[in-house]
Image (tube, helix red, strand yellow):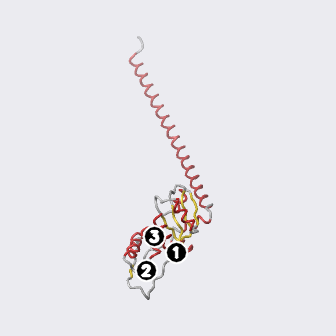
Amino acid sequence: NGPDKSREGINHEGSDYFSAGRKLRMAQERAAGRAKEDDEDQNKVHDFYFEACFDKEEKLPPWFKRLLSLKTERGREKEDSFLLEGVRCIRDVMEHTPENLGQVLYTKEFKDIALLEELKEINVRTQCLSERDLKDVSGTTTPPGILAVCRSASMRPNWETAQYVTLIDGVQDPGNLGTIFRTSLGFGMDAVIMGKGTVDPFNPKVVRGSSGTLLRMPF
């Protein structure tokens, strides 16, 4: 009797099948191994990034830490200063209360060279920062490229002559408070009185909402 060809065929096909299965398992094991290695590498990258960020924060110069502190109410009270962003707001302060301008920070991408020259003419210090550093200090997602550090000096109401007063009670939305300041100035109000629970008037969002008119409205 000759060899059973059909059986040989089955054995051959079965051998190929199990060989393919073994190759598939080996490939899966290799893929799993690579995935594990990738996870370990990713963890190493994360740890390195965390350490780098921590080191960077530790090595920040004192003057930059003070700038960052102005984003908080406690920092503004301690430094007696606040942040003012944008050309329009800065020009408003330059025109009406230039004595409150302490320092102006800008990026090399800022294009209004005339404004920078005007600031130097009135002896306001200017400093160029990297775009990343200015964004860290800024309170906006897309900073305008220039911001000022201003003294927290508000105009005091003259109660002997004040006739029209805006009363604010517990307004906690910064944008709304800024709008109230701007509107009060537009209507010629003599003063603004803020009741308990009202947001800090030097909050960056309040300052932006007032378009820089905050320092022209007695409160």
- Which quadrant of the figure contains the C terminus? bottom left
Q: Quadrant of residue 185?
A: bottom left
**How far apart, in angstroms, are the residues tagged by discs 3 and 1?**
13 Å
Residue 137: horizontal and vertical position, in percent?
53, 63
Outermost residue, bottom side:
160
Q: Which residue is mark 2?
A: 196
Q: Is residue 33 above or below residue 146?
A: above
Q: Quadrant of residue 118?
A: bottom right
Residue 179: horizontal and vertical position, in percent?
39, 71
Question: Mark 1: which amino acid?
Answer: Ser
Mark 3 or 1, nearer chain start:
1
Q: Are marks 2 and 3 in contact (CB under 8 Å)?
A: no
Q: Residue at the spot x=57%, y=66% of the render?
A: 121
Nearer to the camera, 197 or 133: 133
Q: Which residue is mark 3?
A: 212
Foreground label between 2 and 3 = 3
Mark 2 or 3, nearer chain start:
2
Q: Is residue 85 above or below residue 16?
A: below
Q: Circle 3 sits in a helix, a strand or a loop, which is it?
A: loop
Q: Which residue is mark 1?
A: 152
Q: Circle 1 sits in a helix, a strand or a loop, which is it?
A: loop
Q: Is residue 172 above or below residue 34?
A: below
Mark 2 or 1, nearer chain start:
1
**How far apart, in angstroms, are the residues tagged by discs 2 and 1?**
19 Å
Residue 56: horizontal and vertical position, in percent?
60, 58
Question: Mark 2: which amino acid?
Answer: Lys
Question: Mark 3: which amino acid?
Answer: Gly
